[in-house]
Every structure is written in structure tokens, then in C-alpha cells.
Amino acid sequence: MGEPVRAWVRWTLLVALAVPQLLVGLWGTLATRNWYDTFPGVGPDLVAAIPPFNEHLAADAAGAFVATGVALLIAAVVPRRELVLMALATYLAFAVPHTLHHVTHEAPGLSSGEDLYNNVLLVAQVLLALVLAWAALRPTQEVAVP
């Protein structure tokens, strides 16, 4: 089996990344139009800020959230280094292009401040995933130097 990762990495994966990805993805999958119109549920409505509504595209995006959430959840439950790194690579493969798009394209339905706030949150999530990957790569036990 693989080498375990630190407990804080596992819990951060679960709470900060897996659960939000799963909640957003399941909401978008089960109630696509509602998700588009009202995400994140407290203003501003981020997805609807970039019209027009496309049910197929919105459902596919929700599926990507579910897929990355499942990978992160598995890594949190079975915290082996190779699973954690695979889950984080999967998450980053989705999150980096998503973040780059938002950083380089203003949302017409958001104010500059709302757009900035959204971008800061997206960049913070990418940075958190990179920190977790770095922590997962570090040995779990310190080697005593004679």
C-alpha cells in the first residue's frame, strides 16, 4: 500500500475541497437551472453573471465538480500519498483552467469588486491544493539525524 499523509492534509482535503466540490456539483446536477440562476446561494449570482444559460454546458460543469469532489473524498477517506496526489492533480486539472478563465475574463453581470472577490477565492483554492500537494509529498516521519 502507499505511504500515509498527515492528518491535517486529509481533513483539509475533506472540508475545504471535497465537500464544497460535491455540494456545488450535486446542486448543479440535480437542479441545473436553479444552480445557474442562484449559485452560490448568496449574492452575487456568479454563474448567471455570464449569460446565456446553456443547460448542457451547466450540467457538464456540475459533473466536473462532482468528479473532482469524488476524487478528493476518496483521497480524504483513504489518505495514501498516491491517492492524495492523484486527487489533487485531478482537482487542479479542473481548477487551474477554470481559475485562469475567470482571471482573464470579466463577468459582465458582476461589479469589479465582485469579480475580484470571486477571483481571489478561486486563486486561493488553487494555492491551497498546491500546499496540500507539497505537504503530501513530504515524508510523514522525520528522520533523526545522529
Image: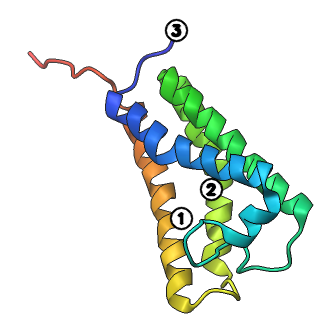
Mark 3 closeness class: few <14, some 14–19, many ≥20 residues within 10 Å:
few
Real-space Cα separation, disc 2 to disc 1, in angstroms: 8 Å
Left or right of residue 100: residue 33: right
Q: Amino acid at mark 1?
A: Leu
- The front one of 5 and 62 is 62
The residue beneath circle 1 is 122
Q: Is residue 89 above or below residue 44?
A: above
**Residues at marks 2 and 1 touching, judged by CB atoms closer than 8 Å:** yes
Q: Amino acid at mark 3?
A: Met
The residue beneath circle 3 is 1
Mark 1 closeness class: few <14, some 14–19, many ≥20 residues within 10 Å:
some
Estimate the x, y position of residue 99 in percent, counting from the top left.
Answer: 61, 66
- The front one of 88 and 70 is 70
Residue located 70% across and 46% down the image = 26
SS under mark 3: loop
Q: Residue furthest left?
A: 146
Left or right of residue 120: residue 61: right
